[in-house]
């Protein structure tokens, strides 16, 4: 299984900045000073070559996203928690990843069912 974390680069974190503002205003979390949003993907049933091809075409946009494998940098002052996505997003990612595997031409189409958990 491969695990990826994708985070917007600092100049493209408008969603995180908006959520930070909402949390500070609506929930009065005035001591909250920063917020990061990372997308986590657990991918099974693909080769490492297919995964590497899919990173910049399915999971991230290199000009605006940072990609971390297995873990992501976090300072001792930061706290992390997870939430999950809808099945619709999961199906879309599985379809895209399967198409990348097929087009790689390396025979890397998964022999077992492809699984992507978000």
Image (cartoon, rainbow, N blue to C red):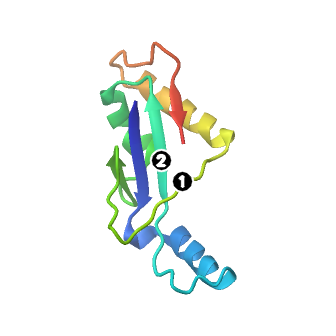
The numbered dot on residue 82 is: 1
In the rendered view, does 44 fall on the left or right side of 25?
left
The numbered dot on residue 40 is: 2
Q: Quadrant of residue 64?
A: bottom left
Measure the alpha-carbon separation of dots 1 and 2. Answer: 9 Å
| Residue 36 on image: x %, y % | 46, 66
Q: Quadrant of residue 53?
A: top left
Q: Residue furthest top?
A: 111
The quadrant of the image that shows the N terminus is top left
Task: Between residue 83 and residue 69, name the one nearer to us.
Answer: 83
Q: Of the two numbered discs 1 and 2 on the same chain, state the one appearing first in sequence.
A: 2
Residue at the location (62% across, 47% down)? 85
In the rendered view, does 111 fall on the left or right side of 67?
right
Closer to the eye: label 1 or 2: 1
Badge 1 vs badge 2, beta-carbon distance below 8 Å? yes
Residue at the location (35% across, 24% down)? 47
| Residue 65 on image: x %, y % | 39, 57
Q: Is 70 placed above or below 39 here?
A: above
| Residue 89 on image: x %, y % | 62, 42
Q: Is 2 placed above or below 71 here?
A: above
SS for callout 2? strand
Residue at the location (35% across, 51% down)? 67
Residue at the location (31% across, 29% down)? 48
Query: Which class describes the residues within 10 Å of circle 1: few (<14), some (14-19), or many (20+)?
Result: few
SS for callout 1? loop
Query: Which class describes the residues within 10 Å of circle 2: few (<14), some (14-19), or many (20+)?
Result: many
Q: Is 89 placed above or below 112 here?
A: below
């Amino acid at each position: 299984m491969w695990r990826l974390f994708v985070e917007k680069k600092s100049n493209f974190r408008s969603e995180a900045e908006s959520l930070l503002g909402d949390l500070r205003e609506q929930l009065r979390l005035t001591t909250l000073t920063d917020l990061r949003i990372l997308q986590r993907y657990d991918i099974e049933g693909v080769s490492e070559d297919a995964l590497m091809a899919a990173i910049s075409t399915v999971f991230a946009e290199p000009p605006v996203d940072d990609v971390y494998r297995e873990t992501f940098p976090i300072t001792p002052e930061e706290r992390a928690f997870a939430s999950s996505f809808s099945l619709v997003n999961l199906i879309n990612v599985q379809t895209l990843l399967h198409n990348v595997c097929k087009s790689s031409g390396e025979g890397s189409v998964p022999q077992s069912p492809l699984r992507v958990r978000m």
